[in-house]
Image (spheres, coloured by chain):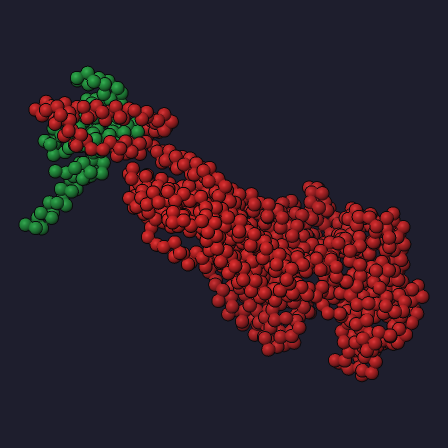
Amino acid sequence: MPTPTDLLQGTLDLLILQTLALEPMHGWGVAQRIQQVSKDVLQIGQGSLYPALYRLEYKGWIRSEWGSSENNRRAKFYRLTAAGRKQLGAELASWDRLSAAIALVLGQTAEAQS
Amino acid sequence: MIAELWTRLRFFLLRKKQGELDEELQFHLVQSIEAKVAAGLTAAEARRQALIEFGGVEFAREECARQRPGWWIDTLQRDIRHGLRVFGRSSGLMSVAAMTLALGIGANTAIFSLVDGIWLRPLPIRDPAHLVALKSVKNHAAADSEGVETGSSYPEYEDLRASVPAFSDVAASDRRGFVLPTADGLQLLLAAVVSDNYFTFMGVQPELGRLPEESELRRLRTPIVVLSHGTWKRFFGGDPGVIGRDVKVKGGSATVLAVLPAGFRGTERFIDPQIYVPQSSWLIQNPEEIAWRASSRADREYEIYARLQSGANLSQAHEQLQMLSADLAAKYPQANRDRKFDADWQTNSGAGGMRVLSMLILSIAGAVLLIACTNIANLILALNDSRRREIAMRAALGATRGMLLRQLVTEYAVLAAFGVAGALLLARELIALVPALLPDIGYPLGFDFRLDHRVLAFTAAAGMVSVLVCGLMPALATTRTSPLDAMRAQLPQHSPFRMPMRKVFVVAQLAISMALLIATGLLMRALMQIGNMDLGFNSRQNAVLMGIAVDGRGVQKQAVFDALVARMKALPGVKDASVARVVPFPDSGGGMTQIVLAPDEAPSDTAGIRVWFNAIDNGYLRAMSVPLALGRGFTTEDTATSRRVVIVNEALAQKIFGTAEVVGRQLRLGRQKTQEAEIVGVTVNGKYADLNETPQPYLYFPLSQQSRSEVTLIVTTTGDAGSLLPVVRKTLRSVSPDTLIVNAQTLTSHMQLVTYTNRMAAWLTASLGGLALLLTTLGLYGITAYAVSRRTREIGIRMALGALRETVFRAVMRDGLKLTFAGMILGAGGAWFLGSAMSSLLLGVKPHDPLTLLGVAAVVLATAIAALMVPARRALHVDPVVALREE
């Protein structure tokens, strides 16, 4: 199982932005959502999650505010900003280009091997 | 984009509260536990697993902090604050270290600015990179008194310009005297007579007026001059209306056409020409030179500079010069046989010796800085030993070695910052001091020393190097120990006495400072000796010396001299006045010489001896207090038409006649056509050219029987000579407005110039020696403190076993004193060599002068003991219980 540090540089940022694009969420929620959607393949520990959230916030792509959670605890919710939405679009596009390129390379190698 | 910047700025200014993250993490943990409870674990087990999964929070905390834009500024601030605290905690030592660094870097900065000003800084002219200097070189075998390397003559300049295609252009300049009438009477200026293309060649833009092209200068019927910035300020009051004004010059008038910008000196590195005269204008003023200039190929007075054609290289130029030299040698065998032209980059030519000297001084200064840094590094190493626990604690709390290094190096960067600041202040003072240290040669010197961006860059580099040496070295050593060892206060495993390199280093430093201080002592003794030396005249009286040039025929000149002396004597406070060709120690060695034959010697090409002479009026011997041993001085009876008379000194009398009783005898003058003169008096011997000389033969002629235009007016006073100077100048103007003042100074400053080298040598060795001693003290302290800190345990055991405190104290002192004595003995030996090498400056003071040796030894020993006392006293206060518990 890959740990988040094995993720491609910037991929965690993309995952978080994508997750937050659906609805504002607190840190725990983001981690849970990524884990669920990836069927437990991607587990993100607090050691990488919070630095990434802070980084995105400092870049102005997400914004945080205190609110209360489902079970009425005080929690900090993160929300995508307009700049974040634009960034997400750009990153998705570049991710598509990258994965297509990787697929090409891998496909070629697979053909050469067969 | 703007929004993003704004966000960054906002977060930069408003930091996140520390608690927010903790609360967020807490929430995360609680959620995790609840999720596990919901999955069916017991509360305790859920909590346990969640905590394990969660891991340490410090990493996340640190990482989150690092995400903030500009987080490193915080870290830097923290490190600097910490550095300042460390600084404050051992402020005494750190101040000494900072001061040492300031001295080391400051000396380097000042010296670099000198070397840069003299040598390295590119000339302020167009395209200095392609400038080559040309010289005429005579074949060694054929070399004679003319010298091996010379400038070139004007006809040669024209040949060079015409027949070397590798040069895009060639310019020539010559130094001449130029008499300028000013409000303050006639002034002798240092003029550069330059080829007509000179200003175009240099690419200089005038500050005022305009600089005409070569063709225009050639067509001019009336001469023009171009003023240097300094001359414009000094003699024309910086008046912008000076352009177009006519100034009176020899044989007519010349028009001021332009003022050059400040700092322009053409290709001169050492002097600052005061006025520039294009060649064609010079010839209009001095028509007698036209014929001579065109024909005289061997009159090599011009310095020639050329600029390489783009695309041409130096070796092409060499080939073409070779061909030209061969051509000229064939065409003009008399002037050009065995001669060839040589070209080299302007930056490599000229004052080669000066360049070597500059580089030598710069490397010595660099070595001093390195020694300073090494000593400070040793000191810091000793200090760090006591901080080992603090550092170990930090390491144990998770600081990586990189972080520790960064923090330690920042501390020394703080130290270096203080050092650099002090260095710049010091360098500014030193540079301001330099003009006062340069000899007064009567012309403006062209040195331009300043703290510019080049010097600042150098200082920054020196500071950086010193941080690396002072900071990184000890930091690496300190952080090398494992936290565990350090917590147990265990020092790295090597015995306290295995520091041979450091010991050798300290001994060498001691030896160097000892040697330099002895040299200083010897030079000071020699300077004191000059004060008591019998120079054969009174060099300590207050007198004004004024070099003047008087126009006219013999009788007229004599009348001017007499009138001058009479008027000066009438001035209030004036004791005596006299006119003589020179005073002792003229700029040109001993002055002019006269051949004297022995009574029975036959006239021939090589007969006789050369004797320095002076031409004096009747009052000279009295005014300068030159004692007569026998006979009389000159009187009004000795005139241009009376029989020829001379006064000799005892050395000359002994040499020619074998006795001092020579009054009334005839002296034979000249080599082939001899002339006789009656000796009327004998003076005692004096010093005439050099403080170090053995008694030299000397001769006085009456001024009335010699025709001299350039003489020295001597006015002695009971009051202050400096304030008499302007009075003498004014009186001179009123007696003879046409008289040119070549130079004016007091006897005291004239004698200062005589002892210039001695004083500079004393000053240099004193400052270097003082600096060396300071560094040595620090070095000795550092090494001893280090040794004591390493031996704390051993000392504790000794004390526990009953050793007396005195014994411990003595043991520490003994180790240091051993090094001190070794250094002192070596230093005394070194001083003996140094003393022999500079014996010419020592004026008979012996290199083993016991008083100096003892005095310096006492100073060095006292300093060393003071440096040793501090760590030795620390050893005294080692508490055996604490020392052993630390085990």
Q: Residue at x 59, y 48 (%)?
A: B430
Q: Is residue B132 visible?
A: no
What count of labels does the image hold? 0
Q: Residue at x 40, y 35 (%)?
A: B77
For the view shown, which residue lies furthest in the top direction? Answer: A72
Direction from residue B314 to residue A97 in the image, left or right: left
User: B569 or B573: nearer the eye?
Assistant: B573
Question: Which image quarter: residue B522?
Answer: bottom right
User: B728 or B724: nearer the eye?
Assistant: B724
* Chain represented in green: A
Tell me the quarter of the image containing the N terminus of chain B: top left
Direction from residue A60 to residue B517 in the image, left or right: right
Q: Position of residue B423 (x, y in %)?
A: 53, 45
Q: Residue at x 27, y 29 (%)?
A: A54
Direction from residue B647 to residue B26 in the image, left or right: left
Q: Position of residue B93 (x, y in %)?
A: 48, 43
Q: Is residue B635 visible?
A: yes
User: B214 or B847: nearer the eye?
Assistant: B847
Q: Position of residue B110 (x, y in %)?
A: 56, 50
For the view shown, which residue lies furthest in the front direction? Answer: B802
Direction from residue B373 to residue B669 in the image, left or right: right
Q: Residue at x 35, y 26 (%)?
A: B15
Q: Position of residue B818 (x, y in %)?
A: 49, 58
Question: Is B139 drawn above or below residue B206 in the view shown?
Answer: below
Tell me the quarter of the image containing the C terminus of chain B: top left
User: B321 or A35: nearer the eye?
Assistant: A35
* Chain represented in red: B
For the view shown, which residue lies furthest in the right direction? Answer: B637
